[in-house]
Image: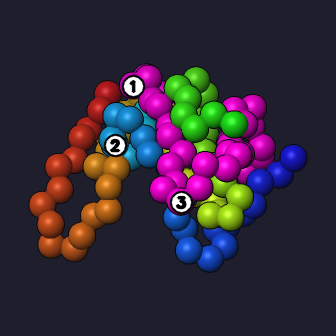
Amino acid sequence: GWCPLSPTGAQTTQLLVEPPWRPAVLWDRVTLTCQDSRTAGAIIWCKDGRRWGQEGRNHFTVTESGTYTCDRPGTGLSPPMRVLDDWLVLQVPARPLLEGATVTLHCRA
């Protein structure tokens, strides 16, 4: 089935990535974790806008490139996380970036 296209209301569901860089790259053995401090309800994972076969698990190691989200009933859809399989990628830290702050960039090949 299809997944929601955009978050509704406040986004309290977060999609964490390890290693903590965006966009994530497949050859880093990326782990995604669906985190929400308020509920422990069922998790629905989506890949490229469609429901995907990791339901119920709060984390997994990515084996395919694509755009991932997770959804917990009552807390909403997470922001999307892109996982690339490109040979050259410019990455930024996977945390909120503030204007004027010093940022370390990774050029990965």
**Residue at the outermost right position:** 1
Q: Residue 21 carries which label?
A: 2
Name the residue: 32% across, 28% down: 109
Badge 1 marks a residue whose secondary structure is helix
- Disc 1 crowd rating (10 Å Cα; few below 14, some 14-19, many 20+) is few
Which of 21/84 is in front?
21
- Span colored in magenta: 26-55
Q: In this view, does 67 lie to the left or right of 97?
A: right
- Disc 1 marks a residue whose amino acid type is Asp
Q: Which amino acid does label 3 sit on?
A: Arg
Name the secondary structure under disc 3.
loop
Give the label, 3 or 1, closer to the camera.
3
Q: How far apart are marks 3 and 1 (CA)?
A: 30 Å
Residue 58, picture quadrant: top right
Cα gap from disc 2 to disc 1, whole angstroms? 10 Å
Mark 3 surroundings within 10 Å by alpha-carbon count, few (fewer than 14), some (14 through 19), many (20 or more): few
State yes or no: residue 54 in magenta.
yes
Which circle's residue, 3 or 1, is located before the other in the chain? 1
**Residue, x 63% and y 34% (percent of image)?**
57
Q: Residue at x 24, y 70 (%)?
A: 98
Q: Are marks 2 and 1 in contact (CB under 8 Å)?
A: yes
12 magenta-colored: no
User: In the visual, does 91 lie left or right of 55?
Assistant: left
Q: Residue 38 carries which label?
A: 3
Structural distance between the alpha carbons of marks 2 and 3: 25 Å
* Residue 35: x %, y % from top left: 50, 49
Q: Residue at 83% across / 51% down in the picture?
A: 2
- Residue on which disc 1 sits: 28
Give percent across and percent down for residue 80.
56, 54
